[in-house]
Image (cartoon, rainbow, N blue to C red):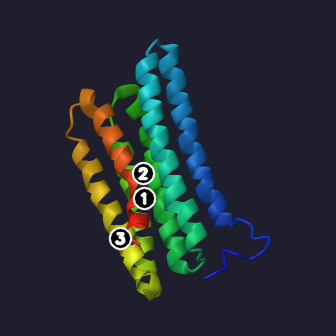
Amino acid sequence: MRDPEEDHRTATTLELFFDLTFVVAVGRAAAALHHEIAVGHVAGGVLGFVMMFFGIWWAWMMTFTWFASAHDSDDVGHRLLTFVQIAGALIFATGVASAVEDRELLVGVVGYVIMRVGLVLSWLRVARDQPEQRPRALRYALLTIGVQVLWVAALATPYDAIPFVFFGLGLVELAIPVCRRAAR
């Protein structure tokens, strides 16, 4: 494990590649928003963009940036789990246009869940390798799994109710770090 406190630490090539996959997803979301505005579907386009951007931003921030800063590792297991998360980000990116333009969320949710599965597996590695961090790591893993089950279940929601379900599940996602801190 590398020391996250080391001076002048630079991003690895893999970290930069990972970030680039999220740039692709943001670009797809922006292009879909532009398309929706161009065809006169401003409200739907903005709503779809906000939902997709939240998925991109939250997964990037929590899945990799925050986790990697707290538990920086550069071993083979970490790299493989990073590739799982990259695959999820690219799947998510392929589903962005259909989510914003056609209100079809399946591909985006599948990509998001894959990214989050990579995070759960990373937390389980922390629980295994750092006994002093085990309770915290397991709490994060279990809370993240629970929310992913809810995202998959939300696919059965009629699209008109999706903004409300999305808002609720988004708040739950944002609450995970707060719940973890409160349980210290």
Choose the circle earlier in sequence order: 2 or 3: 3
| Residue labelled with disc 3 | 139
Q: Nearer the viewer, residue 110 or 130?
A: 130
Report how far apart the C-alphas of labels 2 and 3 lie in the structure: 15 Å
Q: Quadrant of residue 31?
A: top right
Q: Nearer the viewer, residue 184 or 101?
A: 184
Secondary structure found at label 2? helix
Name the amino acid type tagged 1. Val
Picture layout, residue 98 above or below residue 175: above
Report the side of 45 relative to 14 (left or right).
Answer: left
Picture layout, residue 6 above or below residue 151: below
Tags 1 and 2 touching, CB below 8 Å: yes
| Residue labelled with disc 1 | 178
Residue occupying the far right of the picture: 8
**Label 1: how many Cα within 10 Å (few below 14, some 14–19, many 20+):** few
Quadrant of the image for the C terminus?
bottom left
For residue 174, which numbered disc appears in the image? 2
Identity of the residue drawn at 31% across and 67% down:
142
**Label 3: how many Cα within 10 Å (few below 14, some 14–19, many 20+):** some
Residue 83 image position (x, y, % from top left): 51, 65
**Label 2: how many Cα within 10 Å (few below 14, some 14–19, many 20+):** few
Q: Nearer the viewer, residue 88 or 163?
A: 163
For residue 151, which numbered disc appears in the image? none
Identity of the residue drawn at 49% across and 39% down:
53
